[in-house]
Image (tube, rainbow, N blue to C red):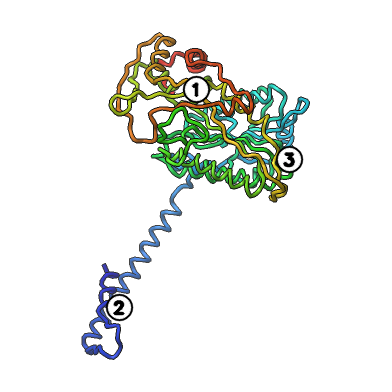
Amino acid sequence: MNMKLSSSHLDNIPSTPGKFKMEKASYLNRFRWHYSSLAKLTFWSFVFMGLILVFLIKSPPTSQTTSIPSDLSRRSLKTKSWGGPGWEKRVKSSAKIRSPNGLSVLVTGAAGFVGTHVSAALKRRGDGVLGLDNFNNYYDPSLKRARQSLLERSGIFIVEGDINDAVLLKKLFEVVPFTHVMHLAAQAGVRYAMENPSSYVHSNIAGLVNVLEVCKEANPQPAIVWASSSSVYGLNTKIPFSEKDRTDQPASLYAATKKAGEEIAHTYNHIYGLSLTGLRFFTVYGPWGRPDMAYFFFTRDILKGKSIPIFEGANHGTVARDFTYIDDIVKGCLGALDTAEKSTGSGGKKKGNAQLRVFNLGNTSPVPVSDLVSILERLLKVKAKRKVMTLPRNGDVQFTHANISYAQREFGYKPTTDLQTGLKKFVRWYVSYYGSGKKTDH
């Protein structure tokens, strides 16, 4: 209030000098008023500063458990310590190539769903594999830890760290001259972007740029295969989706960050000679999957007797997805790695044109979500409590359908698992991992 009064006094003074005459009494009264106001303001400022000081002294230090749960971007950099002879030995051992003409691959997001399966497949065929993951709690971290244990049993070490940590990434490249990077680390989920948008920018844009910055300076530069998304097709109505189709009308922030990633990849390929291959995954499912995916939480809630939402489009239109089984996705990832040409730069300088590709990895057989539920009912031997709802405007699209002819032509990509077969394998894993799920929540 005092500031407003002072401002109004200043506003009343004419801007032209020589046209204003102040009376002595008025001047003294105003001087006394200003002095009194200034004294009060100073007094309360000191009181307020004192209270803040007391609060800071008395308050306990903040920990990771008391931070805002939704702020993944801050939490993700709070990683465990790394470095030292023992740590470097584990890194080198994990990344050691054990087959003729094998690859040495850094897999980011290695404790994630796709990352775990790709890492295991690479290791089985004799490639050197080192994982990197920050184990954030976008979904249950214990599932990620279980995947980590699975990979460790096969000799794969996952470094706990963040893709935004440039010092860590540079250190990894100092210890191991990776031939390839399989960049799968990202903030996933379409709907969650409405709750925590900054985490998508942090991981999917800033994180990607950081990885590319480190890769461009490496000598030799690695070839990079990275996860884009079928979400980039956004509001497109032409089906099936082709890599040649427009991708300039995303329906979610997640899709927008993945589209931005593709443009960033083009930039680093053009300027620095990095070999880059983007993979547009179509609704991946299977054992060790993500709990935020419909097939996963449908299974959980059907077993618990809870109702499940079945979305439909405008005018009762069918919502369908091109569900793609994890083993088929892994084949596509390995095919992309095996056909990736070398980067042409050195020490951050381009020496020739480099390979730049983007592929759809889907199943080419869209299935209505209502049919997915019917299959789960048969496999679980439990009737689902369906709750039909209109598809909300939260980033989800009504259908996806992949044209995979380009991937077929380039590296023989050919999905072989139908939804019935894939869900049967998923349900078998789910029940063995969680039990019946009827009594315990997770």
What residue type is disc 3 on?
Answer: Val
Residue identified by numbered label 3: 175
**CB-based contact (under 8 Å), mark 3 and mark 1:** no
The picture places residue 316, in percent across and down from the top left corner, at 29, 24
Q: Amino acid at mark 1?
A: Thr
**Mark 2, residues whose alpha carbon is within 10 Å: few (<14), some, or many (≥20)?**
few
The amino acid pointed to by label 2 is Tyr
Q: Quadrant of the C terminus?
A: top left
Query: Which numbered disc, 1 or 2, marks the residue closer to the eye?
Result: 1
Residue under the image location 67 percent in, 26 percent down: 122
Q: Nearer the viewer, residue 335 or 438?
A: 335
Q: Using the rendered image of the protein, determine whether residue 292 is visible from the camera's viewpoint.
A: no
Q: Going by the picture, which residue comes out furthest to the right? A: 100
Among numbered discs 2 and 3, the one appearing first in the sequence: 2
Q: Could you say where residue 202 lies in the image, as x and y percent from the top left?
A: 51, 44
Residue under label 1, please give it: 364
Compared with residue 414, is residue 140 higher up or lower down, i.e. above or below? below
* Drawn side of residue 247 relative to residue 36, left or right: right
Q: Is residue 165 above or below residue 321?
A: below
Q: Which residue is mark 2?
A: 35
Circle 2 or circle 3, nearest the eye: 3
Marks 1 and 2, the one that precedes in the sequence: 2
Q: CA distance from mark 1 to mark 2?
A: 79 Å
Disc marking residue 331: none
State the residue at coordinates (34%, 19%). 306
Q: Is residue 29 left or right of residue 255?
A: left
Between 266 and 392, the one nearer to me in the picture: 266
Q: Secondary structure at mark 1?
A: loop
